[in-house]
Amino acid sequence: MGMTLAQAILSKKVGRPVSEGEIVLVDLDFMMGQDGTSPLAIKVFKEMGGKKVFDPSKIALVIDHSSPSPNHGVSQLHDMMRKFARETGVILYDIGDGVCHQLLPEMGHVVPGDVVIGADSHTCTYGALGAFATGVGSTDLAAAMISGKTWFKVPETIKIILNGNLPKGVFSKDIFLEIARRLTADGATYKALEYHGSTISELSMDARFTIANMAIEVGAKVGLFLPDDVSISYARSHSKRNFVPVFPDKDAVYENEVEIDVNKLTPLVAAPHTVDNVKPLEELEGTPIQQAFIGTCTNGRLEDLEIAARILAGKKINPDTRLIIAPASKKVLKEAVKSGIFEVLLDAGAVFVTPGCGACVGTHNGVPADGENVISTANRNFKGRMGNPNAFIYLASPATVAASALEGKIADPRKYIS
Amino acid sequence: MELKGKAHKFGDDINTDYIISGRYKFKTLDMNELAKHIMEDLDPDFYSKLNPGDFIVAGKNFGCGSSREQAPLAIKHANVSAVIAKSFARIFFRNSVNVGLMLIEADTDLIDDGDELVILPKEGLIKNVTKGIDIPFKPLPDFMIKILSDGGLVEHFKKHGGYSF
């Protein structure tokens, strides 16, 4: 019986064929914590008797969730992370460097075939590179910083087949919203997603990161793309590490298959307050929008800003709507400045904040008022997610968010794309 | 060992933002402080309704969303003795084992808000005293029981110097 990609990667690490459902202890290639989870991991590391980390070059701490610090309490926690990085030699990405899930691939820390954990649920993003990457909590990270290992239950896999070409105005975010609509919030709990089909070769790395990033929103452990020319050349150009890509067997056995005819997709929106509350844009068109947000580990990459700039070039956003943009990293910001996208967006009325997670997680940089509607490129629209339980969050592609900022209401991006 | 307390019932897909909002969790490592805010966005008075030993009871996919370990820690520090749900999200599940919070997967349609429950973990049984019915559940895998019985992963590491399954 052939192996799925999840099985193949874990088998290679363990050095023997592993079966689904089996618990395996695995050596990790890289691990990460952010400022919402690292302070607790550091505390637990010390409680466990940790003196030094197993390998400082395989650990990154990223200050991105409340960055720069909005208050005294957070400042103390950031200080704790900086001191720990100095003491142990682990890699520290400080304020403004970017969102952890953009930084790890961008800085070459993750390559195809890796096994990676992060104390952040969207660590599954690196599945776009064909890496088995998943979110854990602070205690798991602490134990991994000491031992270099963690345990996994080898997951069953749902095969997702994406066939056809993306229609005008439809993007990778819409593909995942369709997956969320079909699988629902717990449709893949404990399971791996593995992407196949003809659509994938036309998807850029940025587009793939969006899809892999949201695997957790259907409960999945990982969202894996098979390595191909696009992902291998991305890894080679960003990382100095040598790697051998890992592939599933042709006769792999999948728990379930979901096929999506991408040709037929239209722009989609996840309405409040769950990610699987997905509706065709037409049903929500005209909903007034007070704040539009482009950014996050889902859709804050250069391609996302380019898409927004194409729609907003030479225009002004609605005067009753705020447009906040958080580039996913300093590098993305620099490239946006260099290419002129930054100026186009500024001229259209956008406000840029420090590369980081703030608005998405409700720590600062864009907390909505009571009763306000927000349209966002993020991955979660839970009640209170952006810092106010009395606001309403709609999730959509950067194109839909840009079009909505322009009109001051949920709007169809297809009108603005030639 | 048996656990006794009252059921506080919630629905499906209770995410970690609801358990402890990002408004609080990014600011402090004081879990007793965070405990005061558990479930606040769903029920602002929830913490004041809890008595030590009570249970949180929910539908499917409890603990979905972010990886914040503050979620099971805040529940534990609110003196909730166990969470009973139809199913749990995976990161929440491993975090709970790691911090020593007991999770039980059972048919929670048989429990209503306010029901008095007695849990017999070894027997794999929930006694719904109010309704006079027994609800069976499947015990956790052995290695998780080992971590839980060591008192969580910190104590497990201190005792064994690393993972010991």
Image (cartoon, rainbow, N blue to C red):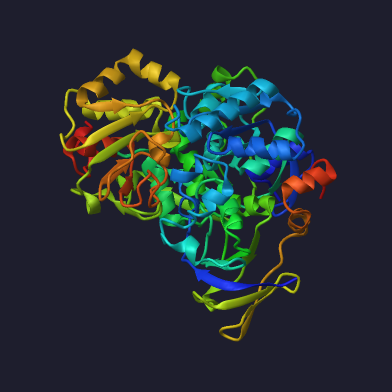
B1 relative to A32 in the view: left or right = right
- In terms of depth relative to the viewer, which is nearer, A411 or B28? B28
Quarter of the picture holding the C terminus of chain A: top left
Q: Residue furthest right?
A: B160
Between A68 and A230, the residue placed more toward the observer is A68
Total marks placed: 0
Residue A85 point in image, percent of width and height: 63, 24
Question: Depth check: B149 or A201 in front?
Answer: B149
Question: Percent position (x, y) of residue B153?
Answer: 73, 48
Which is more toward the observer, A343 or B21?
B21
Residue A220 is at least partly visible in this image: no
* Residue A332 percent coordinates (x, y): 41, 21
For the point 43% across and 51% down, which residue is it? A180
Q: What's the residue at 62%, 22% (across, down)?
A: A91
* Vertical order, B122 against A292 (above or below): below
On screen, residue A187 above or below A111 = below
Taking A246 as reference, is B149 above or below it?
A: below
State the residue lying farthest toward the bottom.
B132
For image coordinates 28% across by 38% down, the residue present is: A292
Query: In the image, is A353 to the left or to the right of A416?
Result: right
Res A121 seen here? yes
In screen coordinates, is A271 left or right of A100?
A: left
